């Protein structure tokens, strides 16, 4: 269900920059969704809480709840 936030040239991906010091929670807000819609977040393949700061160059994966949307 988060696919709706991806760019047309990269279906299923949101490519962008987040400010230095931003957390997963900040990213969720930045892309325009809510914590209710995200079940799990990972940074570079490791699950993490939403309070974790995003390191520079990180790959973030947000997984939705089953049936969300």
Image (cartoon, rainbow, N blue to C red):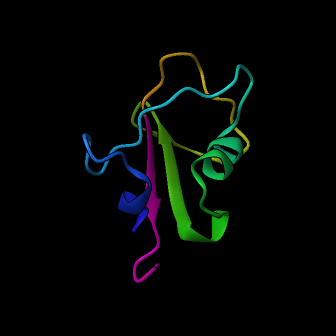
Asked if 15 appears above or below 25 in the picture, the reply is above
Q: Residue 66 sits in which quadrant? A: bottom left
Number of numbered discs on residues: 0
**Does the segment drawn in magenta span residue 27?**
no
**Span colored in magenta:** 60-69
Asked if 31 appears above or below 45 in the picture, the reply is below
Q: Residue at x 34, y 44 (%)?
A: 13
Q: Residue at x 28, y 47 (%)?
A: 8
**Does the segment drawn in magenta span residue 65?**
yes
Q: Nearer the viewer, residue 5 or 52?
A: 5
Q: Residue 52 sits in which quadrant? A: top right
> Whole-percent x and y of residue 68?
46, 79
Q: Quadrant of the N terminus?
A: bottom left
Q: Is residue 64 left or right of residue 3?
A: right
Q: Residue 53 sits in which quadrant? A: top right
Residue furthest to the front in view is 8
> Whole-percent x and y of residue 50?
67, 48
Q: Which residue is drawn at 68% across and 51% down?
A: 29
Q: Which residue is drawn at 42% across and 30% down?
A: 59
> Whole-percent x and y of residue 23?
70, 36
Asked if 25 appears above or below 54 in the picture, the reply is below
Q: Is residue 19 left or right of residue 13?
A: right
Q: Which of 14 and 55 is in front in this view?
A: 14
């Amino acid at each position: 269900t988060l696919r709706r936030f991806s760019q047309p040239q990269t279906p299923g991906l949101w490519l962008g920059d987040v400010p230095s010091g931003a957390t997963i929670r900040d990213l969720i807000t930045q892309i325009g969704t809510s914590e209710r819609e995200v079940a799990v977040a990972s940074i570079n393949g490791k699950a993490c809480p939403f309070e974790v700061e995003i390191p520079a160059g990180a790959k973030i994966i947000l997984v939705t709840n089953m049936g969300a949307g």
